[in-house]
Amino acid sequence: MIVREIACKSILTKSGIGAVDYAANPYVGCAHACAYCYATFMKRFTGHREEWGTFVDVKVNAAEVLARQLRRARPGGITFSTVTDAYQPLEEEYLLTQACLEVLAGYDHPVSILTKSALVLRDLDLIRRLHDAEVAFTITTLDDEIRARFEPGASPIPARLEALQALAGGRRPHVGLLRAAPALALRQRRADRRPLWRVEAGRRRLCAGGQPEPVRRRPGTSHQGA
C-alpha cells in the first residue's frame, strides 16, 4: 500500500449527488480495494497512475481546513465517504475522520457516514453527540468468503453486522443497510434465504435498498460462482 501525507486546500465540497449537499473525504483512494468500486474515476482528477486500492493519500490537515470552511458554509447535510471510506484501516492511525467529527460537533449540519468498516464504533459516543447523524453500512452479502474476494480490505461481514446492531441500539444515529452488487446478492440468496433487511438491528431507522450498482471488476477478478 502506497501511503502519502498531503495537505489539502478544501475538505468540504459541494456535491452533485441528489440528496447530498456537501461531501467530505478525508482520504484520497481506499485500502478496501473493492472490485466493483465506482470511485476509480477519481484517478482522472488526482493524477494517480497506481491501481485503485493500492494507494491512499492522507489529508493530514483535514480537520483544520474543515473548521475554516464551516465558518463560511451555508446550512446543509454533510456526507462522509462519497469517494473513499472515511473509516478505512488508516483511520485507526491518523484519526482524521474522528477529528472532523469533533469539529462538526460544534455545528448543526446533519451528518451522514457511509462505511464498510466496524471501526466506526470507536467514535460511537462522538457520533451521538452530533446534532443529527446517520451511519449507513454497505453489506453486499452475508457470505464472508465472497466478501473477501470482492471487498478484501473491508471489515468482515460478522464484524459489520455486530457494529450495525450496536449503532441501532441507541437513539442516534440512523442506520442504512445497502446492497451494492447484484451478482453478490444472488449468491447470498442461494447461500442464505434470509433477506438482508431481516438482520436484527433494533427498531431504529434500518433500511435496505437502493438500486444495485453494476459490478465493475478489475482484471483478474472473476464473478464465477456468484
Image (spheres, grey):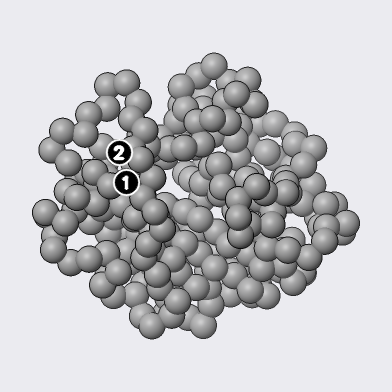
* Residue at 58% in and 21% down: 48
Q: Is residue 219 left or right of residue 224?
A: right
* Nearer the observer, 104 or 61: 104
Question: Residue 157 in the image: x percent, y percent?
Answer: 29, 55
Q: Is residue 154 left or right of residue 44?
A: left
**Residue farthest along the right direction in this orientation:** 72
**Whether residue 209 is visible:** yes
Residue labelled with disc 1: 181
SS at circle 2: helix
Residue labelled with disc 2: 150
Q: Is residue 189 left or right of residue 49?
A: left
Pointer 2 local density, CA inside 10 Å: few below 14, some 14–19, many at least 20: many
**Whether residue 1 is visible:** no
Sequence-first disc among 2 and 1: 2
Q: Please, what is the three-letter code of the amino acid marked with disc 1?
A: Ala
* Residue at 46% in and 37% down: 38
Q: Please, what is the three-letter code of the amino acid marked with disc 2?
A: Phe
Question: Residue 60 in the image: x percent, y percent?
Answer: 69, 40
For residue 223, which quarter of the picture? Answer: top left
SS at circle 1: loop
CB within 8 Å, label 2 to label 1: yes
